Image: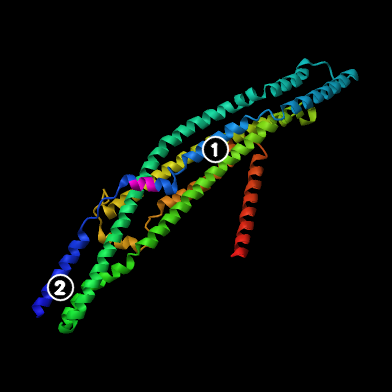
């Protein structure tokens, strides 16, 4: 009888080892990629939203002539006032006749008349910067999106492996319970201790492999990180669109007012602010390119670790390492999530960096006011949600 019990224990141990060592089936990569793109978008930054932002900027800039007529009338009035002041100064002998200062109002009036061409000429250097940095970003982002799909496939393979092993642990537990009820009374204490050392790790593994909630929590964390990054990018581009549109539409008034000696610097200030705001997109693409390099490194690092857990093709899992990893609480190493948050923080430095290149006043204060307004909205929404709950 004892020999039969020992033989059964050995067969049970061999069966458990063999079943846990078997490979998991390969996943449908194309289907998993389509699911990921449906749930999280076709890339780290959704191409549809980026296209919409570019089209929105071009659409708003077409309304540059809303106040051209009013600005021209105002410029004509200011030219009369300017020539009256200059004539009076020459009549009383305070100033001598100078030709070049008298030509300045005519030049400003021509700027207002040819306002569309003038804004395009001023924005041309910043458009070159935007085009170049956009190409750099797109070339690197293609690699990041490919790594993102590979990482998602390996994560899904790891989850499938954990679910498979959990099911095997459940079967082993039920069979061990059945065998306990039949043979526990007839074994010695030494054999009982040996059986406990075999069964206890299976039960512990069953308790640790709670895959469903871990995978859900992991996906929520990653989705939160990627949307924080996207929102920060969209906010910067929307701020750039709003500021540049206001400068283009209301800019003729700055040109008209600069005819008067008291507001002589308003035109040069407008140019500095317009160039600084148009640099937002170029600087934003440059920061997104640098963040893409960090994302590529983080994804490659996590992909190499996932391959250690489930194999290079995701079909040969390491049970012991998977159990250790599942015990961490989330099915992610956290590097990609941290990189997403770092990129979101870096995006809000775009206005400050722009003022480093083109020194101007008012842009940083306007951005700070927008940030304070956003914080106020969030606070009010949080209080409203708290009172509702």
Query: Which mark is first along the chain, 1 or 2?
Result: 2
Q: Where residue 159 appears, x then y in whole percent?
A: 32, 57
- Splitting the image into 4 quarters, where does residue 334 fall? bottom left
Residue 201 visible in this rendered orientation of the protein: no
* Residue 213 is a magenta residue: no
Vertical order, 229 against 168 (above or below):
above
Q: Position of residue 252 (x, y in %)?
A: 71, 28
Q: Is residue 219 left or right of residue 160?
A: right
Q: Which residue is mark 2?
A: 9
> Over which residues does the magenta segment extend?
31-35
Q: Provide the major secondary structure of the magenta segment.
A: helix
Residue name at image x 70 percent, y 32 percent: 250
Give coordinates of residue 333: x percent, y percent: 38, 55
Name the side, left or right, on which 35 lies relative to 261.
left
Dot 2: within a 10 Å radius of its alpha carbon, few (fewer than 14), some, or many (20 or more) residues? Answer: some
Q: Mark 1 = which residue?
A: 53
Q: Secondary structure at mark 1?
A: helix
Q: In which quadrant is the C terminus drawn?
A: bottom right
Disc marking residue 348: none
Instruction: Give the quarter of the image for residue 189.
Output: bottom left
**Percent x, y for residue 249?**
68, 32
Residue placed at 56% from the left, 42% from the top?
A: 236
Residue 79 seen anywhere in this rendered image of the structure:
yes
Vertical order, 301 against 357 (above or below)? below
Of residues 229 and 157, which is closer to you in this image? Answer: 157
Going by the image, does 278 lie left or right of 208?
right
Residue at 39% in and 42% down:
145
Q: Is residue 39 above or below residue 131?
A: below
- The local secondary structure at tag 2 comes to helix
Type of colouring: rainbow
Front-most of residues 300 and 159: 159
Instruction: Measure how far apart labels 2 and 1 are at the Cα level.
Output: 67 Å
């Amino acid at each position: 009888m004892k020999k039969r019990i020992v033989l059964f224990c050995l067969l049970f141990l061999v069966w458990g080892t063999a079943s846990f060592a078997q490979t998991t089936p390969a996943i449908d990569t194309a289907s998993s990629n389509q699911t990921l793109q449906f749930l999280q978008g076709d890339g780290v930054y959704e191409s549809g939203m980026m296209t919409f932002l570019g089209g929105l900027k071009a659409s708003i800039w077409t309304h540059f002539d809303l106040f051209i007529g009013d600005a021209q009338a105002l410029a004509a009035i200011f030219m009369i006032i300017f020539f009256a002041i200059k004539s009076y100064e020459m009549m009383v002998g305070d100033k001598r006749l100078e030709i070049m200062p008298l030509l300045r109002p005519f030049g400003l009036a021509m700027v207002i008349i040819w306002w569309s061409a003038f804004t395009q000429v001023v924005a041309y250097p910043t458009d070159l910067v935007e085009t170049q940095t956009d190409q750099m970003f797109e070339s690197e982002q293609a690699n990041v999106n490919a790594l993102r799909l590979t990482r998602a496939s390996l994560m899904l393979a790891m989850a499938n492996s954990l679910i498979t092993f959990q099911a095997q642990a459940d079967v082993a537990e039920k069979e061990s319970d059945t065998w306990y009820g039949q043979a526990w009374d007839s074994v010695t204490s030494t054999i009982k201790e040996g059986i406990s050392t075999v069964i206890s790790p299976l039960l512990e593994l069953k308790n640790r492999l709670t895959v469903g909630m871990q995978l859900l929590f992991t996906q929520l964390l990653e989705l939160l990180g990627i949307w924080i990054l996207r929102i920060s990018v969209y906010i910067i581009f929307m701020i750039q669109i709003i500021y540049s549109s206001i400068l283009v539409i209301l800019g003729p008034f700055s040109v008209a007012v600069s005819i008067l000696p008291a507001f002589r610097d308003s035109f040069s200030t407008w140019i500095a602010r317009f160039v600084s705001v148009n640099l937002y997109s170029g600087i934003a693409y440059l920061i997104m390119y640098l963040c893409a390099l960090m994302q590529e490194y983080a994804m490659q690092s996590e992909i190499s670790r996932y391959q250690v857990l489930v194999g290079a093709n995701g079909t040969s899992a390491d049970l012991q390492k998977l159990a250790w990893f599942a015990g961490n609480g989330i099915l992610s190493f956290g590097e990609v999530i941290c990189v997403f948050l770092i990129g979101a923080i870096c995006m809000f430095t775009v206005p400050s960096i722009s003022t480093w290149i083109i020194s101007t006043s008012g842009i940083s204060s306007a951005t700070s006011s927008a940030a304070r307004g956003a914080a106020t909205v969030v606070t009010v929404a949080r209080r409203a949600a708290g009172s509702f709950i």
